[in-house]
Amino acid sequence: MPQTVTCTVLFADLRGSTSLYESLGNAEAASVVTHSVAVVARIVESQGGRVIKTLGDGLMAVFPDPMPAVRAAEEVHESLIRIMGAARPSRQPAMRIQIAAAHGEMIEVAGDCFGDAVNVAARLLDHCGDNETLVTAQTRAPLPPEVRERFRRLERLHLRGRVEPVEAWRLESRRHADAMSTMFGDSAPAAVPEGIRLSCDGVSRIHTVRNLPVILGRSHEATYCLDDNRVSRLHARIEWHGGTFQLTDMSANGTYVRFGRQSEVITLRRGSCTLHGRGVICLGVNPGVLNAPTVTFEVLRFEDTDPQPLL
């Protein structure tokens, strides 16, 4: 009989297994992937959660409330780092994991789960960067204050199949949370703050850590709006993460990055990369394509640069 319950739904998805099969071979890669998914399942159960089903290289689980789901997510990230460090030779591609959680009502029928919380968590996973955990505001709200402080608010995301945007929060690692606390605490920061100059269609701005994330996309809600049908509404975001400026693709057509005068182009498809030096970001098409929708960037150290006024 269908039963309506309020709980926290968590989706976890391993990315990069295809490259792992190419580099390690079928047998070893399959062992690593199977072991990794099993570890995620054991962590879920150890934190009081219940695995509903496995989904390719990931799984769906439910928890009675948000706190054990957050503890499980953090332990999963730490465990995957240990697994990949032990299982792969140096310079071999690593798997990444993306986790999303939503708290709310769902309906349980014959061991499976349906409802708004399930749909939101599944769609929120599409917006996760590599090794990120994203949660909804409803998931963060009941957490203890010291845990809530470890989340950073992102933009309101438009999820597939939903009319209203969803407020999303990203869980920061303990090390990063401590660094951010020091940077924005009462004491003066020990490190020189950095900025990133972005230029698009004749508009150039410098963004500091305090006014990120920056959203690139076709939507008028984006920080930089590029009106081109090859660009997704919310195509990519730039944020301060772990002491670096990170670019994360959230699009259907991918994001392309070329640094300086290098000919090599980095292709991001729901992945992330660190921005350094200067270069170009192309949305939806390769930089070599005529009239490609482009944003140029330059990472700045203010001790070496006379920055332009913030706009």
Image (tube, rainbow, N blue to C red):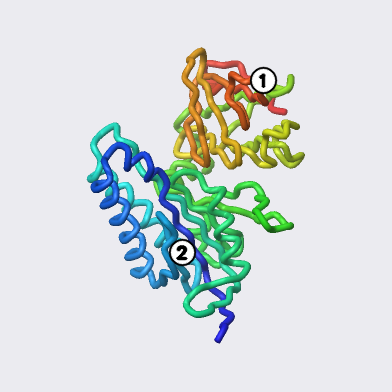
Q: Secondary structure at mark 1?
A: loop
Comparing labels 2 and 1, the label whose residue is closer to the camera: 2
- Tell me the quadrant of the picture where the N terminus can be found: bottom right
Residue 308's disc number: 1
Amino acid at dot 1: Gln
User: Which of 281 and 223 lies nearest the eye of the viewer?
Assistant: 281
Residue 140 vertical position relative to residue 112 in the rendered view, above or below: above
Amino acid at dot 2: Met
Q: Is residue 211 visible?
A: no
Q: Which residue is mark 2?
A: 60
Q: Residue at x 41, y 50 (%)?
A: 14
Image coordinates for residue 168, horizontal then vertical, percent: 60, 53
Whole-angstrom CA distance, mark 2 to mark 1, is 47 Å
Q: Residue at x 70, y 32 (%)?
A: 224
Q: Residue at x 57, y 54 (%)?
A: 124
Q: Secondary structure at mark 2?
A: strand
User: Which of 140 and 21 lies nearest the eye of the viewer?
Assistant: 21
1 to the left or right of 67: right
